[in-house]
Amino acid sequence: MKRRSGIKMLLCAVIVISLLSACSNSNNNSANQSSDPDSSSPSQSASAPVESNSDSVPQLSGKLNISFSNQSQSLWEAVAEGYMKKQPGVKVTVDNKPQKNYKEWLTAQFAAGTPDTDLATVNEVRALQQDSKFVDLYPLFDKLNPYTGKAWKDSLDLEAMNINMDAVGATDHLYSLNFESLQIVWVYNQEIFAKVGITEAPKTFNELIADFTKIKEAGYTPLALGGDANSIWSGKAGWLVRIYADQYLRDYINIVRSQENDYSFLPGLDDSWKYDLTNTYNDANSKVTKNKLRSWKAIQDKEGPYGIVDNPHWKAYAENLKTLFSFTPDGFFGVSEDQAYNLFLSGKAATMMGDPSSYWQLPKDFAEAEKNGGNGAVKTFDYGFFNMPTMEGPEVLAPVRTIQIPIGFYGMVSKDAAQSEIDADFLMYVTSPEGYGVYLDAIQKSSDASLSGAPALKDITLPAEMAKAFASFEPIGNTEGLPSAGNNLARGLMDYQPSVQEWVGSAQRYFAGMITVDEYLNQLQSNIDKYFEAALKQNKYELSDLVTPEREPPVRN
Amino acid sequence: MKKLIYTFAIILIWLCVTPSLVQAKENWSLENADSISSISISTDGSHIAIGSLGAEAFLFDSEGNEIFRVKAMNSVTAVKLLESGTLLVASDDRHLYAYDGNGKLLWDRNLPRSVKDVSASTDGSIIAVVVQRSRELLYINASTGEDAGTSSLGVTMQGVEVSPNGVWTAVAAADQYVHVLNAQGSLVHKLAARGKINAVSVSDEGIVVVGSTGFKVDIFNKEGQRLQELSLKDDVMDVTLSANGDLIAAADYSGNFYVFDDQGKMLWETQGDSAGRVVAFNKDAESLITGADRGIIYQFDVGTAVKSAKKQALMNKILVTAGCLVVLAILAAILYWMKKSNRLGVFVKIWRAKYIYVCLLPGFGLLILFLYVPAFSGLFHSLYDWHPGGRTEFIGLDNFRRMFQDPYVGKGIGNLGILIVTGLIKAIIPPLIVAELIYHLRSKKLQYGYRTAFVASMVIPAVAMLLIWQNLYDPNVGLVNNLLELIGLGSWSHGWLGDPNTALWAIIFIGFPFVGILQLLVLYSGLLSISNELIEAAKIDGATLSRIIRSIHLPLLSGQFKFLIILSLIGIIQDFNAILIITGGGPMDSTYVPALQMYYAATKFDALGYSSALGVMMFVVIMAITVINMKLLKSED
């Protein structure tokens, strides 16, 4: 009897333990180990030398979990391998995720506590950035990069990154590292262009529209673009919406630039700056500092380009944009980005928005389609690139620019000092000639990764073919990262998602011809007014801050 | 027993009517109600300097009477009172000012950037200044304002604190380390913080207190070893140490102010009206001055406050003990009643089945943990502006109000109505037809074969099926349009998902011919359970097949219908996968449903409280429909 009850007890214990063990967080052991500041001496933390290496790189110990969005797993595993050779005490785990639902995944990770991942892609999680869930990189740029032997910032091409370290204020933060440049350009099917008799790539918007008309008449889709609710804001259509708004609203800089008594004013820079629309980099961060509060105040006051209704610039811009979008695929508002790309790849569409990475990615995709047996749907064709054709007209203030920024959006999840040190060390390695060499080599071997453009890194030598290809993309100025009316208002208010949600429906109705341009602009202005205070609050500002925009608001959490 | 209850009630009433024992000795506000950036108290406690983001610095006496105020051209970031009566004022206007005790400007030092912090020993022998973006700590001569040297840290700094005796300087660096320097400006050690450093303080003995993100305060001894880890209720805004390091005060963003002893024991806590910004002790830590948003300054007598807090703690202990006693008494009373009414046998029964209960325990535990806790959490948080891991504020019914003003919820309810009607039709009629067809097959083998063939389709993942249908609807290369062109109906080809008039119907059509496997099996098994005698009797009476179905099958399947209708309703109201994947709510907002808005609120809008409220509302609707359904479709069983 006793034996029986003993067996019963054992059975019960096994069931209880095995069920409860499913709930245990065994994976956290390592995280705890590395995130516990007590596990280290105060002065050296978890970065205490484990064993002296042959070179002068200080040795760290701990773990590093990487989960980037839409990045090649094999590429980052190769980089991790290279890093672990330099830092044998650090175990790097790469677990990249697909872009779809990455934002939701990362948000859920934070909602559940501190995420396991240490490095993440952060461009889609603006709210988390505002809640300081990531490490500010500006201060780290001043630190010594042990893989180059100089300050980290000295091996970064800060101008290409649109960063002016001198103008960084106490409340300015940089939560993502972007070291691969991207210039938005048009990619076109040369064979279709030749077939309809177009011999030269368009330089102006009117030429583009004339070409598109010919292409459409020949039975092709002129522009492969995703226009469904998931794509129109975050996808390539959203790029066009912002890029062309910039041409009409360039005078924003006179409103938002730092004034002499502003907390953000930088003597020696701001006092010598001159408004010059002929210079496409006139409002770059390296040329002039901006006061974010002045931009918010301008939106509140509907000042100059920040006022939308009855503004002829906004109206002319919106009308031209609608003309452009009329050359998109049939059923545009139900076409996803993938479907649009397939249209171009299968030779049914003449152009698409892209970047220099298409130079290498298209041949890979042609080969992939051939290997997978696309039943002849995909045939290799000659393709080329051209820059943004510029819009013209009395309301246009300046020639067109493009989005020309380094991308990557690699962010360090805010944890303890020791973990941050490992995270930063890894990123320093990747941006060093040695680490980037590994990265570059892995890209060339990879079937699912390619360079988007020349790296925004110094001391890097690209293979001759790559360097030549990138050199052929003529820079025409950059609109990205500026607090301009185009960036802040053209797709809803400041990427504030409830406002974006409303804009998506409104924009689709306008492009579909269901509402007039005036109705569209009225709806956009109402949308901005409606969400202004909530968006302001999400950005940690209050209405009272706008009364004295020259003063830096107090820290708010 | 009665006496005990009376005693407890009296204690409770006494505690309720007794006012808060912790009260500010003094409080006053700055005129312009701007946030306070810094406080400095003279060594004798007779003067209090206040820096304000309203571009002014004030000097008050200990009673809160203003002695003078000085203006800067931008926010005052820090103030420091020296033993000599000199007031140092740092400002975002890129100046560091020194005033004498009467407010007369002694010197004005122009610096290249905003002056973010200034701290000094009481005698002014060490004045350390943090300039924006500088990686060098700047030392200033107190009498001239000229440079007295620098200490290079190699990293940008956020703040600095010099111990009153000038022996130690703690610099909060942006790389999450506190650099502790000696009087010569040499690095003694670096202290690792547990997050971004918000505040730092150092005592004459070299004890360092660091406030960092994650509501943490850490105490380090002069050797740099971590002594204590304290937790606050919100983000740390400021920390300060008494000169001898015995007491630690802190302020958090929710407006709580705390005093701890050097062992980390909380001695006192109170809450102000707005975000706490700064805390400062006078020399002997007799007095604590706190500054908050809206320019509110509180002055506390530390001794009285601590004594009061001790009293309060004692009262709390009594209350808890009394509560425990009452619970025990109630339990005893219940047991006594059970014994009297001879009901104690239930415990014997439980003991006999102890292994069964133990085996059930994990199952129930997991059920509670993963189903009931999240559900109740949603219910609870629907009343909050909920930010897990961040600040959560009670906002009453605001989330529910927002729901009624949300146009996407309104549109969604209309679409949901269409989806419910079509969904119920899809869930009942095609599976019923197929079940009847299989049931009426003569060959058992064929019945089995068809049943298996239908069930086998379950292996296709739902998401894969959705993506296949999305491609079928592709307006340019999709099969649907190509098929229409093939059969000569090219004029009907359409951007099915791009037209607001057809998008919802295109989604409804997904899964054609709508033979749900679960539904099919439920109805088929229902048909099998109908007695053959009934059918035979009906046939003898001359009933046709349609009459048999109408008068025998359908009534006897009412239980199955009820089950399927409830299940389908719940599924339709909760499901938004197809819409999320295929249209995302578009085009032109034509395919929104409330569940999709709930998902977007949680994942895109960072509004988890609102999302919870939508979830609660959906629960209420499902519950109501289920109850109505149960009442209307009463089975005869």
Image (tube, rainbow, N blue to C red):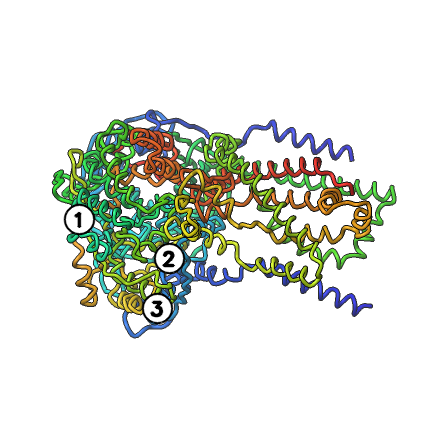
Disc 1 residue type (three-letter)? Pro
Report the Cα–Cα distance between label 3 and label 1.
41 Å
Which marked residue is nearer to the observer: mark 2 or mark 1?
A: 1
Report the Cα–Cα distance between label 2 and label 1.
32 Å
Q: Is residue B531 visible?
A: yes
Q: Secondary structure at mark 2?
A: loop
Disc 3 residue type (three-letter)? Ala
Report the Cα–Cα distance between label 3 and label 2.
16 Å
Q: Residue A155: percent from the left, percent from the top?
A: 22, 60
Of residue B167 and residue B254, the one placed in the foreground of this image is B254
Q: Residues within 10 Å of mark 3 (few under 14, many from 20)?
A: some
Of residue B506 and residue A187, the one placed in the foreground of this image is B506
Q: Which mark is residue A438?
A: none
Residue picked out by circle 2:
A70
Residue picked out by circle 1:
A202
User: Looking at this rendering, what residue extends furthest in the bottom direction?
Assistant: A54
Q: Is residue A101 visible?
A: no
Residue picked out by circle 3:
A78
Q: Residue B228: percent from the left, percent from the top?
A: 47, 52
Q: Quadrant of the C terminus of chain B?
A: top right
**Horizontally, is B565 left or right of B230 in the view?**
right
Which quadrant would residue B621 be assigned to in this image? top right
Q: Residues within 10 Å of mark 2 (few under 14, many from 20)?
A: some
